[in-house]
Image (cartoon, rainbow, N blue to C red):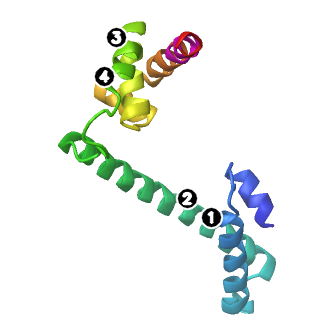
Amino acid sequence: MIHYHIHKLNIRDRNGDFYAEGLFALWNAYRTYDPEAGTLHSYMHWKVRNALIDKIRKDSRTYEQEEGIAEQMVQEGRDQWEDKITDELLWNQVKEALTPNQWKWVYHYIIRDRSISQIARLEGVSQDAVKNWGRHARKKLKELGKTI
C-alpha cells in the first residue's frame, strides 16, 4: 500500500523517509480507526496518502527556507569559507586558459562552492547556460592538466 502511493505520487524515496512516514501513518490509522466511519482499508489508504503529501509539503517548505537563507548569505557575502585563493599562480594559469564564462563557472562552482541554480541567478542566465560553461571548462581543464 505504501509503495503504491509512493509510486502514484511520483516520489523518489532514496533514503526511505517516505516509506517510514507511510509506516507511521499505517500505525496511526490502526490506532485511530473508527469502524462506524467506514472500512479500515479505505481509511488506511487515505491516511497513508495524506501523510505522504504532508511530508512532500514539509520538505518543500524546508528546501525553500534553506534556499532563501543560502541566497541571503550569498548576497551578504557570508558564504565564503576562505578569505583568499591560496595558489594565485595556478588559478591565474587556469583563468588564462578559459573564456570569461568558463572562468565564472570555475570561480563560483569550484572555488566558492555554489550550486548551478545559484550561479545562474547571480549571473542572470539560465541553468543550462551555466551547465554548458562547466562542460567546456572541464574539457579545457583536463587538457590543461596534461600540460602542467
Residue 108 lies in magenta, yes or no? no
Of the two numbered discs 4 and 2 in the rendering, the one whose residue sits closer to the viewer = 4
The Cα–Cα distance between marks 4 and 2, rounded to whole angstroms, is 29 Å
- For the N terminus, the quadrant is bottom right
The Cα–Cα distance between marks 3 and 4, rounded to whole angstroms, is 15 Å
Disc 1 designates what residue? 52
- Of 17 and 84, the residue lying toward us: 84
- Of 128 and 31, the residue lying toward us: 128
Q: Earlier in the sequence, mark 1 or mark 3?
A: 1
Mark seen at residue 56: 2
> On screen, 113 above or below 120?
below
- Of 74 and 97, the residue lying toward us: 97
Residue 143 lies in magenta, yes or no? yes
- Measured as percent of width and height from the top left, residue 105 is found at 41, 23
> On screen, 148 above or below 13?
above
Q: Quadrant of residue 52?
A: bottom right
Disc 3 designates what residue? 100
